[in-house]
Amino acid sequence: MKRFLAALLCAGLILVFASGCNSVPKVETGDEAKSLNASDYADTLDGLATYFSAYGYINPLQTDTVTKMDASLIGAKAGNKYTEYVVKNVTIELYEFDTKNPPATADEIISEVKNNGKFSILELPEVNAYLSDSGKFMMIYNDNSINNENPDKNSDNYKHREEVLKRFRSFKGK
């Protein structure tokens, strides 16, 4: 009887944990939303990653979800690609630019993103990208479940992306 109850309890726990897998978290708004002060974080790529980690968008400490990118291709100082661990099949690339003395490549990429919201390198297809309000950071947010031409603005994935973009754009550390 004890084994049966233990097995039943284990099965119940597995169902509870499995039901949360691959689901998009509810986007919190208003009073429910976490409110972190970006100025508590360093105004660097690591500071931005820590800020995003505090919101649960990425996990920079989980090394299998982080890929160091060759940021020099776009004229950036540094860049990392994160496989978001909260929302599966989402990748977030974060790049930091030298705003005081940017190389010509960076100026070209930043200009393309400002004007078109996209850029292209090395004969590759154009990539959607976003700049922070400070112009110091660039983000590439990929979620294949969102149709960029005709998005379902009521979907949790779309709301999640918009929340990430809002926090990214306004990020300015200390």
Image (cartoon, grey):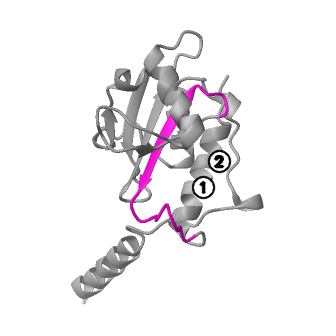
The location of residue 96, given as percent across then percent down, is 50, 25
**Which part of the image, by quadrant, shows the C terminus?**
top right
Instruction: Determine which quarter of the picture holds residue 65.
Output: top left
> Which residue was labeled with disc 1?
162
Kind of residue at badge 2: Lys
Q: 114 above or below 167? A: above
The Cα atoms of the two marked residues, 2 and 1, are separated by: 6 Å
Q: Nearer the viewer, residue 114 or 57?
A: 114
Q: Residue at x 41, y 50 (%)?
A: 84
**Which part of the image, by quadrant, shows the N terminus?**
bottom left
Question: Range of the magenta residues?
Answer: 133-152
54 on left or right of 61 = right
Kind of residue at badge 1: Glu
Number of callouts? 2
Is residue 14 inside the magenta stretch? Answer: no
Q: Nearer the viewer, residue 164 or 152?
A: 152
Q: 2 above or below 84? A: below
Q: Are marks 2 and 1 in contact (CB under 8 Å)?
A: yes
Q: Residue at x 40, y 26 (%)?
A: 74
The location of residue 13, given as percent across then percent down, is 36, 75
> Which residue was labeled with disc 2?
166
Q: Is the magenta region chiefly helix, strand or loop?
A: loop
Q: Is residue 137 visible?
A: yes
Q: Residue at x 31, y 35 (%)?
A: 67
145 on left or right of 132 = left
Q: Is residue 51 visible?
A: no
164 on left or right of 35 = left
| Extreme-bottom residue of the structure | 1
Q: Residue at x 39, y 53 (%)?
A: 85
Q: 84 above or below 104? A: below
Density class for disc 1 (Cα within 10 Å; few <14, some 14-19, many ≥20) is some
Which secondary structure, mark 2? helix
